Each structure stands twice: as C-alpha cells, then as structure tokens.
Amino acid sequence: MTVLAFVIGVVVLVLGLAVSIALHEIGHLLPAKAFGVRVGQYMIGFGPTLWSRRFGETEYGVKALPLGGYISMAGMYPPSSTDDAVPSRRGRMFATMIQDARAVNDETLAGDGAGRAFYQLPVLKRVVIMLGGPAMNFFLALVLFAIMFSGIGVQTATTTVAAVNECVLPAGTEQTECAPGDPASPAAAGGILPGDVIVSVDGADVATFAEASAIIQESPEEPVTIVVDRDGARESLQVTPVLAEREVQGADGEVRTAEVGFVGMTASVEYVPQPIWQGPQAAIEQAGQVVGIMWQLPVRVYETAVDTFTGAGRDPNGPLSVVGAGRLAGEVAATDQPIVNRVSGILALLGSLNIALFIFNLIPLLPLDGGHVVVALWDGVKRLWARLTRRGDPRPVDATKLVPVTYVVVIGLILMGGTLILADIVNPVQLFG
C-alpha cells in the first residue's frame, strides 16, 4: 500500500506539472490569438510528437518529453534581409546557428504569417503575450494556496485538550513513562481531563491554545484559574504551573529552550480554514523567497553538487529538479497521515512549483519569457529614441543575433538541470528525516 501511495503521489505531481505547463502556454496562446498573431503550434513537451490534432490554423499536441512546452508564433523576429550577413569573425558555428534561426523564422512568415507576425505588434502587446505564461503560473499558485489555506485550512492547536501528562518529566530526558517518585503534572493535579475545552485562563478569554499557553508560561509557581467546558458545563479549576525547561517559539519564529511555566497538557490539532487572503499572501511571500534562490541559482546548484559528491546533507530550501519534486510528492502521499494532510502537502508542492515556474521564466535571458520581454522593451526604446530625435523608424530588433548567447544559456540550464537530477537521485532532500 505504501509503494502504491508513493506511485500515486508521483503521478499526481507529474499530472499537476503537465497541467501547469499547459496553462502556461495557454497564457501565451490566448493573448497572441486575441492580438491577431498567427499561431502554428501549441505543444506540451519536447521531442517526438505523441499526439496532435489541428483546429483551424493551429496544431495542438503532446510530445514525448514533458519537460516544458511552447507555442510557435509567426515572426518572432523580423524577416531576413540581404544586410543580415554575419561577419566571419563570429565563427562559422555561430554564423550557421544565426542563419538557421532566421531560416526557421522566415518559414513562419509564409502565407498570411507575414501580416500577422509577433514582431509587428506594439511593444505593450508583445510584453503582454510573453508575460501571459508566467502570469498564468502565478495565478494557479494563488488558487492552489487559497485552496490549501482557506478550503482545507491550516493545522492549528485548538483549545480542546487532547492529552494530560501524568507527571512532569525533565526536558531532554529519554524517559517516556512516569516513575513512582515523579511528581504529578499540574494539569493532572488540577483535574484537567482530555476533551476539556479551555474557555479562559487567569480571567482572560482564549480563542487558541497558543493564547492559553502564553499565559501559563508567564505564570510559573503562581496559582492560575483555568475555566473549561466539560460536556456542556463549565468547570473552574486551580492549576499552579511549575518552572520547567521547555522549547518555546519566540516572536522571530526561532525555537529555543527557556524556563517557563508548564502544566503538562497538549492540544488537539485540527485544520482551521484561514481568511481568503491568507493563501495568496503566503504565495506572494514564497515568491519573494524564490527570487532569492533564483538570483543565486548557479551558486546554489554548485553547492548542491558539492553536497552530493561529499555526502553532505542537502539544504531543504535549495533548488530541486522535477525528479526531486516527484520524490517529495511520493513521500508525502506515502506517509501514515490522514488523507487531508497528504492532499494539503501535494497542493503545497504544486503551488511552490508554479511559483518557481513564474519566477524562473521572468529571468531576462533568452530563450526564457523574460528575455523576449527585454527584446521587446529594447525595441520600444529604439523607436522612442528615433521619434524624439526625429529620425525614421528604425529596423525592428533582430534577436536572432543573440542566438549564440541563447545557446550558451540553454547549455547552462541543461547542465544545472542534470546536476539537480543527479543530486535528487543519489542525495535527495529528506522531507521526513
């Protein structure tokens, strides 16, 4: 059953990623068609075509390698001209690459593509088309996080008492059971029972177990009145917290050991739906964290490679490949937890993947969407400068000249992706220790 659950988790993650890629390309496709650009292909994946069907002028299909997708628009670059000869000093290989890119681009301009080309659009429309894909991933992440936070909820310690310790055990001890001479816990001595719902502590109404714990921790060796609801009737109980070393979470989120008041009871944990803005807010915060990772991606990948070859543990907040994400999804699905916990975990993974796709595609390098946005903006700057200086319209920016740079970027992405895949196979992130 555990193996089957692991496989189901991986499959769900892969399908979710495929849907994310499909929606990303739809984010490009819809505005391109709305602006009149001829779109020849809409493909999910790369490599050999597994299935395709033409609707109107566009061929829709699925390819063998589900590692991305693309749409083929007419005239991503301006057509070739006799002035586009590449100087020999650039080297024959790069010259051939540029000419091949121009030849492929010219093919898309055949027929009615010449009057419906991407490069002919105003700058703003080109930017909208290229940002449509990443925007779709970010929107999907907002939806997934909203479902996770507001539809399912966040695990929260409620005011219902789940268990009461029989005695007080020293912090850090390996002892798990009470010995005859161990003192009774203040909660047990005060008459608190599992199932009691805490109403107030020391005269202050409490809505969460954290609020009750805060008052108790600040009152060591002082009698505290705890009012509980027991089977519909309210009971007023006297409890005197003992001073004990316990792990507490500070205002900065750090967990540290401190001497605080302790009574020896634990709360039941339930999923509590959060306000509708909490999920999107968490997605935005995570996007900020991913920006930091992407900014340092080559360094992070190098550190991952070092950890892999030296046998050191992986940074759980470091970059992952699709293999690593699938492995984590399998582990989440195979855990011995309620189904809602596993669903929430996989939703979190899919949401995080879409945030990563959103940020990654905004990197201002070709062939990524951010690179095409930069080319469009540069074209707009050239046109604006020509108008300001009262010159004629300049030729459109020919991004095929950047094909050698694009080639280097693609090679770098392949190397980093291969490194992460290897690391995720031989030195995976340990989600559950």
Image (cartoon, grey):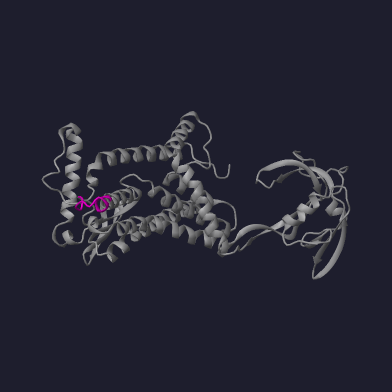
| Residue 406, image x, y percentages | 28, 42
In the rendered image, the residue lying farthest to the left is 82
Q: Which residues are magenta?
A: 385-394
**Residue at far bottom of view:** 232
**Residue at 53% across, 62% down:** 147
Figure quadrant of the C terminus = top right
**Chief SS of the magenta region:** loop
Q: Position of residue 403 (x, y in %)?
A: 25, 42
Q: Nearer the viewer, residue 387 or 268?
A: 387
Q: Is residue 417 left or right of residue 63?
A: right
Between 198 and 337, the residue placed more toward the observer is 198
Res 138 quadrant in image: bottom left
Q: Is residue 229 left or right of residue 75?
A: right
Out of 271 and 337, give the one closest to the viewer. 271
**Residue at position x 13%, y 61% in the image:** 111
Camera sees residue 66: no
Q: Is residue 373 left or right of residue 271?
A: left
Residue 184, how many percent across, how many down?
Answer: 86, 48
Q: Nearer the viewer, residue 219 or 88?
A: 88
The picture places residue 426, in percent across and down from the top left corner, at: 46, 36
Direction top: furthest residue: 310
163 in relation to 408, above or below: below
Picture quarter containing residue 56?
bottom left
In this orientation, does residue 156 appear?
A: yes
